[in-house]
Every structure is written in C-alpha cells, then in structure tokens.
Amino acid sequence: MTDLLPLIVAKYNYWLYVILMMIGLYAMIAKNNLIKKVVGMNIFQTAIILFYVSIGYKKDATIPIIQNAHGGHDAHAAVIHAIDYINPLPHVLMLTAIVVSVATFGVAMALAVRIYQRYQTLEEDELRMRLSE
C-alpha cells in the first residue's frame, strides 16, 4: 500500500480529471433540469479535453520545430532527437474538440430556450407529462 501512495500523489491531475468526469456524468444522469444536464455535459467534455492535453505533455521537452545552424529545417535531427519534443497531435485534436464543445453547448442552450418558451418548464418529468397528453 505504501508503494501505491507516491504513484497516486504523482498523478494527482488524472484523479482530478476522473472526479470532474464523474461530476459531469452524475449531472447528466441524475438531474431532471435540462440546463443542469447540459452543464454536466460541458463539465464532462472539459475533463476529457484536459485529460488529452495532459497526456500530450512531456517534462523538459520543447516544441517540435527544428532548425539547423543556417536557419533551415533539418529532417535528420528530428529522427535523432525526437524524444526531446512534445507530440503536438493531442493539442491540435483538442482544439477541434473545444470548438465542437462550444458549438454543442450553444445549440443545446438555444434548444433549451425554445423548449422553455413553448412549455414554460425545463424539468424533464413535466415535459414528459405534457408531451404524452
């Protein structure tokens, strides 16, 4: 058990992401208000984005732009010293995920406004009763 504690402390950021994911999942499943469900979805998406950005991080690494002494790019140096560079792919993919997340949140909020204008409620149970009549 004592061997496990340093590993848990060293990876505290991953535990934070798991907690955020569980908060978002709980809000999506347990809450009856549509706004709370949408906010829970947004928290869940944010936790996933933070997780992917953190796995793209490497200690004491730099950006993957290599220049030789003459100012040009050196393809051979990239192969030799690739371990010293950060992989930009997770960061680039998460930029796309952020755009999708914001768009999804905006559309969900617009739908919630329209639902409220029509039914005067955002509670799931009341909406079900009104739609079944």
Image (cartoon, rainbow, N blue to C red):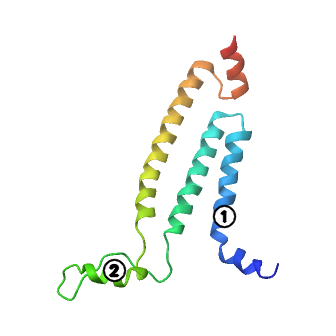
The percent position of residue 25, horizontal first and vertical second, equals 68, 47
Q: Residue furthest right?
A: 1
114 up-or-down from 103: above or below: above
Residue shown at 72%/38% (left/top)? 31
Residue 92, labelled with which disc? none
The percent position of residue 119, horizontal first and vertical second, equals 62, 19
Residue 16, labelled with which disc? 1
Dividing the picture into quarters, in which one does residue 113 lie? top right
**Mark 2 burial class by Cα count in 10 Å: few <14, some 14-19, many 20+:** few
Q: Are marks 1 and 2 in contact (CB under 8 Å)?
A: no
Residue shown at 65%/54% (left/top)? 21
Q: How many marks?
A: 2
93 up-or-down from 9: above or below: above
12 up-or-down from 123: above or below: below
14 on left or right of 109 = right
The amino acid type of the residue labelled 2 equals Val
Residue shown at 32%/79% (left/top)? 78
Dividing the picture into quarters, in which one does residue 132 lie? top right
Gap in Å between the C-alphas at discs 1 and 2? 35 Å
The percent position of residue 47, horizontal first and vertical second, equals 59, 57
Identify residue for label 2.
Answer: 79
59 on left or right of 1 = left
Query: In this rendering, which labeled residue sits more in front, label 1 or label 2?
Result: 2
Comparing 92 with 35, the one in front is 92
Residue shown at 74%/40% (left/top)? 30
Q: Secondary structure at mark 1?
A: helix
Image quadrant containing the C terminus: top right
Image quadrant containing the N terminus: bottom right
**Between discs 1 and 2, the one toward the N terminus:** 1
